[in-house]
Image: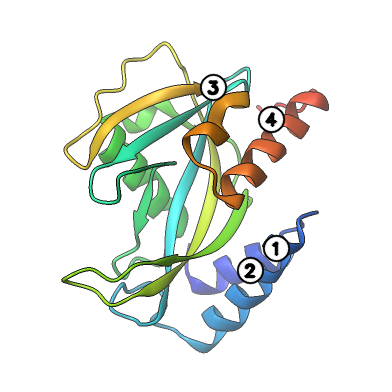
């Protein structure tokens, strides 16, 4: 995947959430204007990739407690110049969970969710924003998930309890999308 493929995915992405639709429009305009959008050094905004990890039944999600930010999130991270944002999202999932790539099933190449969120300033970086491109993946929830040093904990959370761990609007959206998939008996193979 390269920048143009990501733009095509974003242009074809449909959402019923107004906030996400605005993020998609803003992301398209920014990515079109900035060839270097995959570099974390691009301020005040750059592209990141993450995964919304569900079990086969779609009734649980995998969340990690981020050590630096002291919050629960889905796995993901910086592209560091890599325009293959699906590959970035999967690489971050492998790194942050300790799972093997063969244990991860990318449900499809469609974008699952788009979020633009603020990151507070640190000693190393100024305050900035992430255009986070999210993909839906499936993992067998009986596999052990060892995690790594970036996370205090990596756990499976019942879908209906995910918002207790992270009250961000984007978590709400992803939970609702997963609920809709379940209620429509939607499971891509």
Q: Secondary structure at mark 4?
A: loop
Towards the viewer: 138 or 172: 172
Q: Tell me if residue 148 comes above or below residue 36 in the rendering.
A: above
Q: Secondary structure at mark 2?
A: helix
Q: Quadrant of residue 181?
A: top right
Earlier sequence position, callout 1 versus callout 3: 1
Disc 3 target residue: 55
Residue 185: x, y in percent? Answer: 79, 23
Earlier sequence position, callout 2 versus callout 4: 2
Disc 2 target residue: 23
Residue 35: x, y in percent? Answer: 44, 84
Could you give the CA–CA distance between mark 1 and mark 2, rounded to whole angstroms? Answer: 6 Å
Towards the viewer: 173 or 121: 121
Contact flag, marks 1 and 2 (Cβ < 8 Å): yes
Residue 177: x, y in percent? Answer: 71, 40
Earlier sequence position, callout 3 versus callout 2: 2
Could you give the CA–CA distance between mark 2 and mark 4, rounded to whole angstroms? Answer: 26 Å
Q: Quadrant of residue 145?
A: top left
Could you give the CA–CA distance between mark 1 and mark 4, rounded to whole angstroms? Answer: 26 Å
Contact flag, marks 2 and 4 (Cβ < 8 Å): no
Earlier sequence position, callout 3 versus callout 4: 3
Disc 4 target residue: 188
Earlier sequence position, callout 1 versus callout 4: 1
- The outermost residue toward the bottom is 33
Q: Name the residue at 55% across, 49% down.
A: 168
Q: Name the residue at 63% across, 25% down.
A: 160
Q: Secondary structure at mark 1?
A: helix
Could you give the CA–CA distance between mark 1 and mark 3, rounded to whole angstroms? Answer: 27 Å
Disc 1 target residue: 19
Could you give the CA–CA distance between mark 3 and mark 2, rounded to whole angstroms? Answer: 27 Å
């Amino acid at each position: 995947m390269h920048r143009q493929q990501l733009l095509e995915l974003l242009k074809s992405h449909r959402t019923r959430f107004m906030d996400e639709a605005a993020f998609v429009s803003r992301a398209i305009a920014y990515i079109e204007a900035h060839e270097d959008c995959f570099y974390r050094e691009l301020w005040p905004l750059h592209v990141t990739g993450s995964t919304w990890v569900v079990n086969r039944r779609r009734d649980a999600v995998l969340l990690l407690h981020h050590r630096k930010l002291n919050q629960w999130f889905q796995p993901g991270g910086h592209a560091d110049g890599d325009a293959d944002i699906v590959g970035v999202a999967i690489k971050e999932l492998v790194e942050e969970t300790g799972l093997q790539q063969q244990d991860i099933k990318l449900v499809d190449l469609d974008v699952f969710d788009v979020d633009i969120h603020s990151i507070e300033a640190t000693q190393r970086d100024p305050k900035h924003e992430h255009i986070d491109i999210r993909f839906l993946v499936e993992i067998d929830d009986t596999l052990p998930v060892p995690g790594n040093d970036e996370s205090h904990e990596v756990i499976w959370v019942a879908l209906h309890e995910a918002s207790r761990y992270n009250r961000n609007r984007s978590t709400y959206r992803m939970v609702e999308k997963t609920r809709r998939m379940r209620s429509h008996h939607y499971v891509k193979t």
